[in-house]
């Protein structure tokens, strides 16, 4: 269970951060590039459709990350695990606010403005409010991305630390087993010594000579 949650958590963080990064670098900048689409109005419509799906993806990933972080914080009982949990709560809260509160308001203003290539004078105030809300949205997403990078780094650091601690405990337990075997060998009584070998009997010729001399 622990390994599965860690895999899903890292995978969800990777998808979450990767989608935000790719949207900023490979989608938004391309859509609003001169000559890519027929004006800013069409580019804004396509951009809004992508953002709506991105918001749902972020919330789904946020739920997975929160579940994994909560499990690790309760079971691991490490300070870094609780920091990762706090980061995941902050990220999910920001993503939910952007997806279900701020983005719908921005999208509604976009629809009300209509033509962004030639904004009517009576809608200039709405255009200014749209720009301010869009800037707030961008700042929140950047903060969400920064917190996500921090959470990923801390989570990987925790896993490496736990793995190193487990390996150290295994190495530490091996000499203890060897010492027990050595102590057991010392406590065993030494094997009984063999009786001395009897001296070989003298030959009969030597016995006769000794009798004649006497």
Image: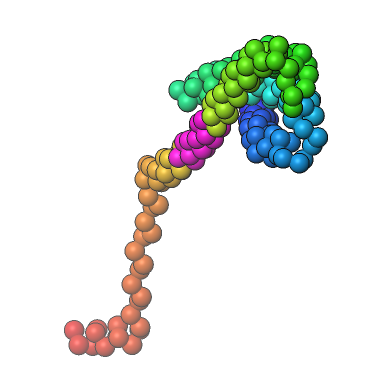
Q: Position of residue 147 (x, y in %)?
A: 53, 26
Q: Is residue 162 magenta?
A: yes
Q: Quadrant of residue 93?
A: top right
The segment highlighted magenta reads 150-168
Report if residue 11 is visible in the image.
no
* Residue at x-position 50% and y-position 20%: 82
Quarter of the image that includes the C terminus: bottom left
Report if residue 39 is visible in the image.
yes
Looking at this rendering, what residue extends furthest in the front direction? Answer: 121
Question: In this view of the protein, which residue sits in the foreground, 162 or 170?
Answer: 162
Q: Position of residue 44 (x, y in %)?
A: 75, 27
168 up-or-down from 3: above or below:
below
Query: Please, what is the dominant secondary structure of the magenta stretch?
Result: helix
Q: Quadrant of residue 116?
A: top right
Question: In this view of the protein, which residue sits in the foreground, 146 or 129?
Answer: 129
Q: Position of residue 192 (x, y in %)?
A: 39, 52
Q: In which quarter of the image is residue 27?
A: top right
Q: Does the magenta stretch include residue 159?
A: yes
Quarter of the image that includes the N terminus: top right
* Residue at x-position 60% and y-position 24%: 138
* Residue at x-position 79% and y-position 37%: 37
Side (left or right) of 59 relative to 166 = right
Question: In this view of the protein, which residue sits in the foreground, 121 or 68?
Answer: 121
160 up-or-down from 129: above or below:
below
Q: Where is residue 14 in the image (x, y as percent from the top left)?
A: 65, 35
How is this picture coloured?
rainbow
């Amino acid at each position: 269970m622990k390994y599965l949650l860690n895999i899903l958590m890292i995978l969800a963080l990777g998808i979450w951060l990767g989608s935000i990064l790719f949207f900023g670098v490979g989608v938004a900048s391309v859509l609003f590039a001169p000559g890519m689409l027929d004006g800013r109005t069409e580019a804004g419509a396509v951009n809004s459709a992508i953002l709506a799906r991105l918001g749902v993806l972020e919330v789904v990933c946020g739920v997975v990350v929160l579940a994994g972080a909560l499990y690790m914080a309760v079971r691991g009982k490490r300070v870094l695990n609780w920091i990762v949990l706090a980061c995941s709560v902050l990220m999910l809260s920001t993503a939910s606010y952007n997806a279900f509160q701020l983005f719908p308001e921005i999208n509604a203003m976009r629809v009300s403005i209509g033509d962004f290539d030639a904004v009517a004078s009576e809608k200039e105030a709405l255009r200014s409010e749209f720009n301010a809300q869009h800037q707030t949205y961008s700042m929140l997403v950047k903060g969400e991305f920064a917190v996500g990078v921090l959470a990923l780094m801390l989570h990987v650091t925790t896993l490496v630390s736990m793995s190193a601690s487990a390996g150290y405990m295994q190495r530490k337990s091996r000499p203890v087993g060897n010492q027990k075997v050595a102590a057991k060998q010392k406590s065993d009584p030494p094997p009984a010594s063999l009786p001395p070998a009897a001296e070989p009997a003298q030959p009969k010729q030597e016995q006769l000579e000794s009798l004649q001399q006497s």
